[in-house]
Image (spheres, grey):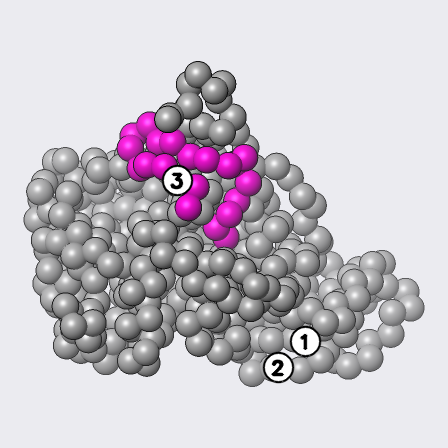
Amino acid sequence: MAVDLLIRNGRLIDPGSGRDEILDVAISAGTIGQIARGIPAAGAGQVIDASGALVTPGLIDSHTHLFRGSDFFGIDPDSVAWQSGVTTWLDAGSAGAFRMPAFREQVIERSEVTVRALINISYLGVAGMNYDEYCNPATCNVDLLERVVDVHRDVIVGIKTRMGSDGVGYQGTLPLVKAVEASQRTGLPIMCHISGSPPSIDNVLGKLRAGDTVTHAFTAAGERLIDSRRRIKPSVRRARDAGVRFDIGHGAGSFSFISAEALTAQGFWPDSISTDLHQLSLPGPRLVEDGEQISRVRGDGAPQLTLLTVMTKLLFLGMPLAEVIRATTSTPAAMFGLADRGVLRPGARADVAILELEPGPIELFDVFGETRRYDQKLACRATILNGVPMTPRPVPTPPPWIRMIDQEPPSARPA
């Protein structure tokens, strides 16, 4: 078969297949044709010299919000994918049962990248900032969710619920209890957001089971995984031993260097690394002036937080490069049943990230403005989607509820 694209001389890191060596990758008709040394370039439609670069499976971001134009948070994945190596995006609960058909039509079917959904236990999905989806117990309708999953099972890979003090004010832990019931009936795993307390992290973890995921694992909020002496809580260790997974979900309010350094110093590393990318996290924490319903953001709108940013922070914390790649490829693929994703092997879909480690120094920020200096960062040289390099495209103009204050007239800017 003719070679459409040949990637030569890159360091191929594919934890799913156990490879970490200099290899060539030949792509034909959107699939991986051959992986070997010294594949002849003659006759190849396009050749990319990846000397000095890392060649990995297309990255998987397992916590994002993509229902752009339909809620507060949604962003456009294609405009970020080309510059971040992320070829598979999981939307974490933007759509509930009533909005899943529209999410499929407007986002999944129109995006160039692969998009899959974790359906919200609330039929409203995530609409606004303040756990609005839980304002009425009737929103957590398991019968309705099961019917919608039956229709859209090919694109729904999990169930999302949020546990935090605002939401508990509405329904207590009922959304999580209902999510467990829905999981038992559909066979889908749960992703559970943690933030402020109540409820306690002990209460939340006690309801999760093997295969479920806690997102925002490095939060410093009330449901944090460490105690007042920065020791890992016993319930956290019990949950991990029982098979509960832990995901980063960086976001605009859920990554603290204090929590991250305390946890990793005790050998507690995330199973998966994700961004929680949305309208307020995309600019990066140091450019967000506030997180109100009409939010003020500095900068020019270009992404300052991508999956590569979060991966770089894990490298800084001491996570080995191959494990960082594993946590953004083969592990999330296994967690959410993503066949043919997160691995490079002959016959697999040709989603590939070509990355490089650029020398620093650079500054890394957490959501509280704490900074750390590091000597390198991950950057994207090319994103290959179904065998074709993605082309650059601009990030869409932010919605009206995001005020880009550096672009406003001086008279309208805050003091």
| 410 up-or-down from 256: above or below | above
Q: Is residue 9 visible?
A: yes
Compared across the picture, whether 31 is left or right of 369 comes to right
The secondary element bearing badge 1 is classed as: strand
Residue at the spot of label 2: 20
Q: How many marks?
A: 3
Q: Earlier in the sequence, mark 1 or mark 3?
A: 1
Compared across the picture, whether 147 is left or right of 314 comes to left
Do the CB atoms of the residues marked 2 and 1 lie less than 8 Å apart? Answer: yes
Residue type, label 2 = Asp
Q: Is residue 66 visible?
A: no
Instruction: Tell me which residue sits at (40%, 67%) in the image.
Output: 272
| Quadrant of the snapshot with the C terminus | top left
Q: Earlier in the sequence, mark 2 or mark 3?
A: 2
Magenta range: 286-306
Q: Horizontal and vertical percent for residue 177?
A: 13, 55
Residue type, label 3 = Val
Q: Residues within 10 Å of mark 1 (few under 14, many from 20)?
A: many
Residue 59: name its quadrant.
bottom right
Residue type, label 1 = Arg
Do the CB atoms of the residues marked 2 and 3 lie less than 8 Å apart? Answer: no
Q: Nearer the viewer, residue 335 or 233?
A: 233
Residue most extreme to the right: 42
Disc 2 to disc 1, C-alpha distance:
7 Å
Q: Main secondary structure of the magenta part?
A: loop
Q: Horizontal and vertical percent for residue 225?
A: 21, 67
The secondary element bearing badge 3 is classed as: loop
Residue at the spot of label 1: 11
Taking the magenta stretch, the answer to whether it contains residue 299 is yes
| 153 up-or-down from 237: above or below | above
